[in-house]
């Protein structure tokens, strides 16, 4: 199993009051960032991403731990600077070896342009609470878990898929499906829930619960190769790599060893991008195979995702462009929505275990889709109509990304 970690996250204090009394308010040279878009709808928690090289060009010598990012009202915003090239060097200490600057802004409906500044400061910017994170969980049979302030997930590694040393010695599950942990608190819960254990996190003890079933299904967002009749799926992930780890965005990769897809060996690497404030994660799946120009990939949702005794009422909807959604009313665990948004989808189908949305994939070229869920007890998505509106807006935002420009402040 590959195990590596490479990320830089430096953040500014939040709040105008903190900015006014903090050394962060002592600003020097600055750069101006303009962010615009063409939609009339609101864009909550819009993630603004720009190459650090643009900041370095407009603000030479800026160091990632000695800047403040501010909105037009002067409020200091949490930010993150990633470095996905861990061997990059900066021998002259001029701040050029980094990847991207990331921060967020919530556009109101009709607000199509916003201005921000990046300023040099004369002290070190303190860290901001992490809202997006991912980690390998060796204490629980090689799980990999990730979360943001809305939702948590996990999936399963080699230890869970290996035969038990003796009958009944441990749970054995072979699947590349994706699990959901439903939250109703904004702070991280993954570490606490693993500590309190299986018999507790399957109950809502105030923070949420694991009430989603995966088993042999695709869970909420697992993939497979579809031949028109049969879905060929891989096993548990075999390797992992964390590329960035909050506070605003977590990025990681999971790799899956080759499996037989109807006579064609296929392997997969998934890159997950997990942003604060979003119910859907972005997933870029790259499949590698030979002997044919392309394959059809299906992304799935488990047909029977609830615990026993919940007597669920499940509504399934298919909408263009590539939106596959479920809304599940349960007897005592509230209601939950799950969804896939696959912009390049060519159709919808199903097998015995899963509802599926299908798209073509070429070897070595990422297939992008979004997967996630929401829970009524979290207090924001309360009905199936709410969930559908959220997904339609998400698809529109994906199709019309924001435009970002940087200039030195006069």
Image (spheres, grey):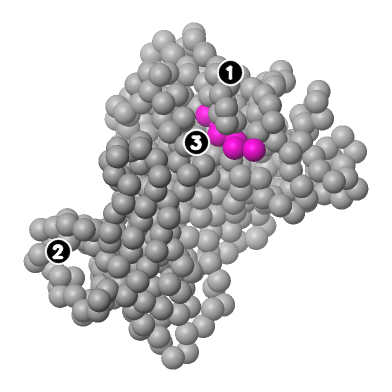
Q: Residue at x 87, y 42 (%)?
A: 264
| Span of residues in magenta | 339-344
Residue 169 position within the rendered picture, expressed as x and y whole percent measured from the top left: 64, 36
Q: Earlier in the sequence, mark 3 or mark 1?
A: 1
SS under mark 1: loop
Residue 229 image offset from top left, x and y in percent = 81, 23
Residue at figure coordinates x 41%, y 10% from the top left: 331
Instruction: Work out how far the residue at label 3 is from the one at label 1, CA to CA, in angstroms.
Output: 25 Å
Give left or right: position of 317 versus 109: right
Q: Nearer the viewer, residue 179 or 339?
A: 339
Q: Report x, y in % for residue 58.
A: 36, 76
Residue drawn at x 76%, y 36% as measured from the top left: 296
Q: Is residue 37 something one can see in this rendering?
A: yes
Please report whichever mark, 3 or 2, sits nearer to the chain's N-terminal start.
2
Answer with left or right where residue 85 lies relative to residue 223.
Answer: left
Judged from this view, the residue extending furthest toward the bottom is 92
Give the image quarter of residue 34: bottom left
Q: Is residue 20 above or below residue 388?
A: below
Q: Residues within 10 Å of mark 2 (few under 14, many from 20)?
A: many
Quick check: 394 left or right of 171?
A: left
The residue under label 1 is 304
Disc 2 secondary structure class: helix
The reply to whether the magenta stretch includes residue 340 is yes
Q: Earlier in the sequence, mark 1 or mark 2?
A: 2
Instruction: Kindly report which numbered mark, 3 or 2, lies closer to the viewer in this rendering.
Output: 3
Where does label 3 land, which residue?
395
User: For mark 2, what is the residue?
Assistant: 19
């Amino acid at each position: 199993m590959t195990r590596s970690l490479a990320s830089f996250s430096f953040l500014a204090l939040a709040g105008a009051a903190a900015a006014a009394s903090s050394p962060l308010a002592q600003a020097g040279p600055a750069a101006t960032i303009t962010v615009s878009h063409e939609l009339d709808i609101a864009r909550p928690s819009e993630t603004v991403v720009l190459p650090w090289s643009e900041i370095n060009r407009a603000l030479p010598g800026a160091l990632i731990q000695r800047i403040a990012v501010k909105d037009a009202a002067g409020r200091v915003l949490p930010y993150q600077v990633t470095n996905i090239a861990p061997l990059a060097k900066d021998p002259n200490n001029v701040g050029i070896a980094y990847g991207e600057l990331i921060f967020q802004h919530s556009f109101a409906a009709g607000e199509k342009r916003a201005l921000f500044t990046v300023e040099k400061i004369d002290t070190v910017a303190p860290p901001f609470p992490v809202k997006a994170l991912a980690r390998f969980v060796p204490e629980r049979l090689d799980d990999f878990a990730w979360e943001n302030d809305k939702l948590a997930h996990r999936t399963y590694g080699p230890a869970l898929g290996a035969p038990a040393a003796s009958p009944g010695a441990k749970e054995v599950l072979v699947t590349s499906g994706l699990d959901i942990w439903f939250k109703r608190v904004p702070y991280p819960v993954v570490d606490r829930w693993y500590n309190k254990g299986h018999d507790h996190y399957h109950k809502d003890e105030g923070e949420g619960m694991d009430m989603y079933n995966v088993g042999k299904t695709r869970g909420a967002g697992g993939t497979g190769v579809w031949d028109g009749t049969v879905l060929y799926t891989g096993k548990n992930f075999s390797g992992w790599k964390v590329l960035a780890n909050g506070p605003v965005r977590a990025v990681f990769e999971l790799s899956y060893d080759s499996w037989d897809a109807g006579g064609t060996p296929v392997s997969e690497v998934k890159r997950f991008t997990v942003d604060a404030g979003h119910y859907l994660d972005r997933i870029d799946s790259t499949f590698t195979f030979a002997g044919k120009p392309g394959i059809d990939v299906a992304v799935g949702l488990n047909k029977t995702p609830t615990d026993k005794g919940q007597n669920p009422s499940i509504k399934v909807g298919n909408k263009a462009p590539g939106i596959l959604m479920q809304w599940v009313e349960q007897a005592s665990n509230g209601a939950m929505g799950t969804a896939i948004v696959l912009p390049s989808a060519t159709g919808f189908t199903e097998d015995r275990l899963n509802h599926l949305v299908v798209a073509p994939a070429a070897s070595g070229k990422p297939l992008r889709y979004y997967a996630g869920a929401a829970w009524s007890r979290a207090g924001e998505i309360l009905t199936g109509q709410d969930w559908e509106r959220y997904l339609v807006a998400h698809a529109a935002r994906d199709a019309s990304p924001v435009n970002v420009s940087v200039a030195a402040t006069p």
